[in-house]
Amino acid sequence: MKPLSIFTTLLTLATSSPTSRQTSKAPFFLLAGDSTTAVGGGWGDGFLNHTLLPPASGLNYGHSGATTASFRAGGDWATVLSQITTHQAESNVYVTIQFGHNDQKAAANISIDQFKENLGAFVDEVRSLGGTPILITSLTRRVFSGSPPLIVQSLANERAATISVAEAKNAKLIDLNIASEDYCNAIGPEASWRYNLFNATRQGDTTHLNEWGGIVFGRLVSDLLVGGFGEEFGKWTVANETLSALLREGVPA
Ligand SMILES: *[C@@H]1O[C@H](CO)[C@@H](O)[C@H](O)[C@H]1NC(C)=O
Ligand SMILES: *[C@@H]1O[C@H](CO)[C@@H](O)[C@H](O)[C@H]1NC(C)=O
Ligand SMILES: *[C@@H]1O[C@H](CO)[C@@H](O)[C@H](O)[C@H]1NC(C)=O
Ligand SMILES: *[C@@H]1O[C@H](CO)[C@@H](O)[C@H](O)[C@H]1NC(C)=O
């Protein structure tokens, strides 16, 4: 018994020391996703620019039109992986993974099972390089229907698939799909227009975000991260309690 308990103690020491070193390092976020994460239409820059306390920072690799397949085939994923290695010494590297909007299009020819497999491979590859994957369910489209008007749940299958991958892989997950849907349902279709790209002319794009939309939904991402994993992210976050309260209470920002 005795040697076993000493061995157990040594194991505990060996694993606890790198862990405590890690939490003292600032996070570096690599954002993988489609246009709803990307510069000029997504939440990524709003999150990176407006919620992180330096030296916490990151890079936005969101790619307009990307699916879980094209993101790899086009080389974006390889770039993300190489950035894990680049930033690992000085940071705790996290890779957010948010897809679904384009994977679900018939032309993409990606089944839900293939979507799950692709997400699972992203998770495994991030971990194999020492990074931490964070799966994110797809930002809601701001399309309403019915009376009273409610968000059309057009990404429910992709949401469920993303959640099941997180469970199977025991990976971090934030449910942006439901959080953004709940918020838009609370504020309604008229106020939801504020966040749409081309809102001034109402061009009909209710998927992509304008700059203010990026800041608002970037804050929502931050609130979900801090809410779910406060020990890791709380002290690296610049709070905006005014905006967070509006998001929590379902009041237009
Ligand atoms: C974020 O910062 C980049 C680089 O400074 C800038 O180009 C971009 O417009 C900013 N975006 C937002 C939403 O603040
Ligand atoms: C769709 O994907 C399946 C499975 O990969 C493949 O067998 C099929 O040929 C593809 N269909 C089209 C139209 O590309
Ligand atoms: C468009 O969005 C901006 C920023 O959210 C807002 O100031 C403006 O009032 C909006 N315009 C319309 C017509 O909704
Ligand atoms: C915090 O959020 C409020 C309400 O949305 C906004 O008006 C304000 O500019 C934000 N403050 C900072 C420092 O970003």
Image: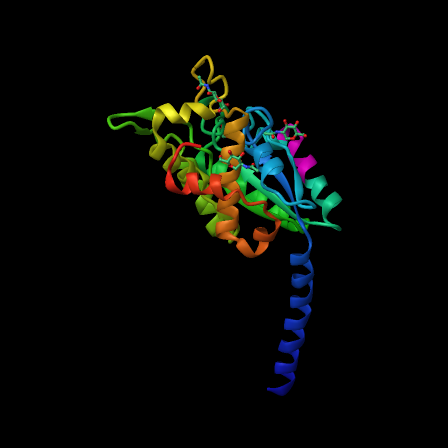
Q: At 42% from the left edge and 23% from the top edge, which residue is drawn? A: 193
Point out residue 182 in the picture as x, y percentages from the top left corner.
37, 37
Point out residue 228 in the picture as x, y percentages from the top left corner.
49, 51
What residue span does the magenta drawing correspond to?
73-80
Point out residue 223 in the picture as x, y percentages from the top left corner.
50, 45
Is residue 246 visible in the rendered structure shown here? Answer: yes
Q: Tell me the quarter of the picture where residue 177 sits.
A: top left
Quadrant for ligand 1 reads: top right
Q: Tell me the quarter of the picture where residue 186 sits.
A: top left
Residue sitting nearer the eye, 79 or 185: 185
In the rendered structure, does residue 164 fall within the stretch colored magenta? no
Is residue 143 visible in the rendered structure shown here? Answer: no
Q: At 68% from the left edge and 57% from the top edge, which residue is drawn? A: 24
Q: Does 246 sit left or right of 98 as displayed?
A: left
Task: Say if 13 sits above or below 172 in the image.
Answer: below
Q: Quadrant of the N terminus?
A: bottom right
Residue sitting nearer the eye, 174 or 213: 213
Q: At 67% from the left edge and 75% from the top edge, which residue is drawn? A: 10
Q: Please tell me whether the stretch drawn in magenta is mainly helix, strand or loop.
A: helix
Judging from the image, the colouring scheme is rainbow
